[in-house]
Image: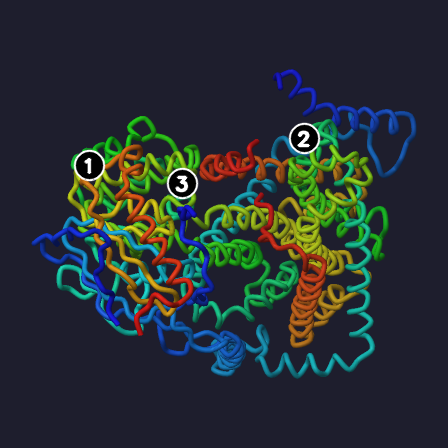
Amino acid sequence: MAGNSATVASDAHQGTDAPVTLSVRGLQKIYSSDTGDVEAVRDLTFDLRQGELVCLVGPSGCGKTTLLRCIAGLLDPTSGTVELDGTKVTAPPKKMAVVFQEYGRSLFAWMTVRQNVELPLKNAGMGKAERKAAVEKALHAVGLDHAAGSYPWQLSGGMQQRVAIARAVAYEPEVLLMDEPFAAVDAQTRADLEDLIRTVWKELGVTILFVTHDIDESVYLGERVLVLSNSPTIVQEDLTIDLPAERDQLTTRSMPRFTELRAHVYEQIQKAKRGTGATA
Amino acid sequence: MTPTSSAPPSTGTAPPPSRSRRRGTAVPSGLLGAAGIAGFLVTWELVVRSGLVEPQYLPAASTVLAELASIATTAAFWEAVGWTLRTWAIGLAVSGAAAIVLGLVIGSSRFLRRATHSTVEFLRPIPSVALIPLAVLLYGTSMQATLLLVVYAAFWQVLIQVLYGVGDVDPVADDTARSYGLGWTARVRYLVWPSALPYVMTGVRLGAAVALILTITGELVIGGGGVGTQIALAKSGGAVPEMYALVVTTGLIGVAINLLVRAVEGRALRWHVSVRREAVA
Amino acid sequence: MTFVKKAAYAVGLPLALIALWWALSHNTTNFYVPTPDELLTAFVDTWIGERFRIDVLPSLARFAVGTGLAIVLGIAAGVWIGSVRTVRSLLEPMLEFFRAIPPPVLVPILILIIGANDRMKVMVIVVGAVWPVLLNTIEGVRSVDSVLLDTARTYGLRGATRLRTVILPSAAPQIAAGVRQSLAIGLILMVISEMFASSSGLGFTIVLFQRSFAIPEMWSGIVLLGLIGVAVSVLFQLCERRILHWYYGQKEVQHGR
């Protein structure tokens, strides 16, 4: 029932000795609707170690968003647990931040970029000087120093998503959840943002769970890729990405290993689509 | 065969929208609504019966409802209701038609829109009740006097919305229509009117509400007929329960009109998928 | 558009209409319609001076107090009702009924309960003008974007902070639309309440003119009411544009205008 850790290449990437930050056990979600109960997610079990960048990929409608919302504490699972640093998640935990796909609806239109990034810090009780420094650092990290006084709707889509990322970064969470954050952004911007995430990740040492439908993106970004099955969803495969730690759009994507991994994930998704990937 | 770079769509089921995290069954809103009405009536009854308010100023709920049932059997009552509805309908129809026509014409021309903007913005906030003395002067205490108020007030409500609607026509669609050689009439018929229809409906809805308010107001202050006049008569005659019963009647008429307009709106805009929001300000 | 062009558009039609009015009324002696200069004279004579202090200012004061109260009440109650689903479902039918009652009919009722005094006039305005604000606030609070709410939750924004930084700004455009309608109704009720059992005030004075056939004076009163209506509208728009500058900016960007 549980996902089997399979790698295509011969040399397996050893798991680190880092402690487990996020632990998902037997997550199940059943929605009751007028037409009967729908089991969106059947059994999701996986761990995220501290500082990992793990991508979650699966066919459309496989419950990626449901899973993310359960982990984020926005949704109660029907059964199973989500634990952050050993504490059960029942409500949005303090040490977690989420970047949503719809950046336009997630940023506050009545606040400037700076105010948007500052708000969670203000709410957490951080002092003024400290906040200012944190905001400037975060905006610098995403390359938006010049846009601090602008309003989100004055910026392009890619820049707006950077603001959302800056807001999450300034918050200094332990775990960063990203729900298909680059799906609504054009391809060139997406490439820039992917690199931005990797940079931010390395600099901050934050644990990232990155949900996407883009197979190439999942392989490019992740240290591990969790392939989800079709609904009712389980973890179909836990694939370790043994690409070098230094990655860039040009060289990494033209590596033969990248192509192999990507093809493998694609096959897995096809199996998932047909419903033949899930064991039992 | 090179694999595509994004996961192909599958036949997986999307979860139905789950708005509540609570797994218990929430009380259906219809039931709560009925409970609300019942609760209000009971409170009203108790407030009066307990002596909190003098019954000569505020009769008990039961008294008022009984009175309503009683006068609803009289011909005079229905005559008044008919008068009110007639005034409302005529006023709304006249103002609506004028506003739609004028709105379409003005809205289609940038020059006209600019030229009339200051005049519209000046005339529009004038409270139509300011015209009451004029109406009385011109028409005495007849239906026309009230109609003057109704038409003036409702006209602006509809006009403003129509102007918004015409102004909101998608320029890309407009260019497309022009490039296919559609003349002005054809564009209005196939493009402008359907685009503006949600706004027109909003305007009709607002206009209908305002028309009722001014109808009753005119009847109340000017006289002449209708439920408003009956209220004034009841008041001067000291028939307090009847006065309250008539006020309840106006509320019921208002609710009925709201439902009617919403039904018309729903039917006329059945095909309109977009979110229909009132043009703000 | 240059300033000259803008000014031309603004005064063009009004001037043309006034000219037309003057031309039509100049030579005939129509009982109902005074000439522009007659009206202007009547306006200055009637309203500039003592009467302004005795009748106009108190009326405006009542309007301000009544409408102000209605707005505050409407927003406060609207936020509560809009946030709690149970309360909303309980109250919805009753609210639908009460908002459908034409506010002016409350004048006889309130005269009965409170008596024909200043308090009654203010109460009439409050009870009548509260509905657009209340209902629009409920709607605005109820329909805050779900992604926005999720974002607020994940960052731990709760209670008063969430209300202040998320819910109210998000609902602000809708509330503003309600406030605008409330102002209009408040003005109407100010006039109506004075046409009834009153011995002073704008509404009373205008009716008095009409009854004594002081036609130019009557018209001047109508014009004054119109000017007040316009002034209130302009003031409102000024405030609204400032508070909702972000909303209008956003719409401009979205519509590419």
| Figure quadrant of the C terminus of chain A | bottom left
Chain bearing mark 2: B
| Figure quadrant of the N terminus of chain A | bottom left
Residue identifier under label 3: A110
Which residue extends farthest right? C28
Identity of the amino acid at label 3?
A: Trp
Residue at the spot 85% in from the left edge and 46% down from the top edge: B138
Do the residues under discs 3 and 1 have CB atoms within 8 angstroms? no
Looking at the rendered structure, whether the residues under marks 1 and 2 are on a common chain is answered as no
Identity of the amino acid at label 2?
A: Ser
Q: Which mark is residue A246?
A: 1
Find the distance from the CA under tag 1 to the CA under tag 2.
64 Å
Find the distance from the CA under tag 3 to the CA under tag 1.
39 Å
Could you say which quadrant of the image residue B17 lies in?
bottom left
Q: Secondary structure at mark 1?
A: loop
The residue closer to the viewer here, A42 or A134, is: A42
Residue at the spot 69% in from the left edge and 64% down from the top edge: B263
Residue identifier under label 2: B118
Chain bearing mark 1: A
Residue at the spot 56% in from the left edge and 67% down from the top edge: C113
Q: Residues within 10 Å of mark 2 (few under 14, many from 20)?
A: some
Identity of the amino acid at label 1?
A: Glu
Up the image or down, A242 lies above or below B12; here it is above
Q: Which mark is residue C71?
A: none
Could you say which quadrant of the image residue B272 lies in?
bottom right
